[in-house]
Image (cartoon, helix red, strand yellow):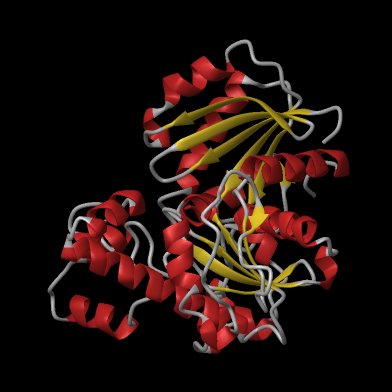
Amino acid sequence: MAGMRILTVNPGSGSLRLHVVDGEDVVDSAEIEKPPADATEDVQSFVEGLKVDVVGYRLVHGGSALISPSVVDAGVREAIAAAKSLAPQHVPNTEALLEQLTGLLPDVPHVVCPDTAFHHGLPEVARTYPLPARWRERWDLRRYGFHGHSFAWAVRRAAELLSRPAAGLNLLVAHLSGGSSVCAVSGGRSVDTSMGFTPLEGTMMAKRSGSVDPGMLLWLLREGHVALDELEDGLYHHSGLLGLSGSSDDTRELVRDSRSGDVRAQFAMAVFEHRARREIAAAAASLDHVDALVFTGDIGWDQPEVAEAIAGGLGVLRIQGGLSSERSEDAVISGANARIPVLTVRSREELSLASAAAAAVRSGPAS
């Protein structure tokens, strides 16, 4: 990234993060706590007078066409439009921001960086759903995986903290945030992950259900208990921590309420931690050994009590609790005698995005 000043655009379903990265330094930023669709004026204000060389966008789902960071052209725009139905809470936000920012910053390259790219090389046995071949072939039904930029950064930092090359490490990485997923990494590459065709699968999240029995969903539809739109809204917006607690989707609030004796908050956190342990243990089956467990994401980085509860229940993997509660910097937080180190790494998706966007510009436009 040397010599490049890069604006990174990281839209979530309900928030937007903008960073200006110069080398590996963030020189300006804005965290907009509103849906990106409502942030048009905020974005315009932030970029007014801004001088950058590249704009890089986090694209949650690249579909089958966008498998690497790509300089935006007509073909890339068509691929983004085709991926909207795969992640309807996220991709339309990126598309709208791309439209706005190419208008505001027309003279620099714009690069979309799919989260799914990190998992593109998943082994066939890990990416394949046991569905009829005609379905899989016609609609490219497969596991894509998400949170790729967070995982890529966590792997890089873990290698530095352990003083070992990433190519020689087998890692379990848990990205715990509003959206959560787990990844098994071997030799710097994703070999299994908990999210699949969409960002709805896998471990329980803030408002998303994670994996549930598909037969139960078919029953709800077939018996007329819920309509399709209601089912989608419930799974994406009213499940997870919010659905179980009935009060909050924020683990900080739920931990506080749990300590005050709120039974529903206690239960919501217990299920969240249980589901995270299940996914970590499942991902471990794709590795022949485990060199470290890495916590990242807002919860993984900033809530030591959650990391402790999860790690402390993974004795079957020879992972132990008793973690340090310090979160001032990336660190090994397990004891000196731990058989498997436990690390915490602050998610720096903006730096991963900037690196990916710079590489894409240097390699030329998408073909």
Q: Is residue 245 visible?
A: yes
Question: x and y percent of residue 201 in the render?
Answer: 44, 70
Q: Nearer the viewer, residue 308 or 100?
A: 308
Question: x and y percent of residue 92 in the render?
Answer: 46, 44
Quadrant of the drawing holding the N terminus? top right
Residue 56 higher or lower than 40, as above or below: below
Residue at x 81%, y 28% (from the top left corner): 4
Counting every numbered tag in the picture gives 0
Residue at x 87%, y 44% (from the top left corner): 363
Question: x and y percent of residue 294 in the render?
Answer: 62, 64
**Farthest-out residue, top:** 49
Residue 287 higher or lower than 160, as above or below: below
Residue 210 higher or lower than 282, as above or below: above
User: In the figure, is residue 209 to the left or right of 114?
Assistant: left
Q: Is residue 233 visible?
A: no
Q: Nearer the viewer, residue 160 or 185?
A: 160
User: In the figure, is residue 104 to the left or right of 219?
Assistant: right
Residue at x 72%, y 39% (from the top left corner): 354
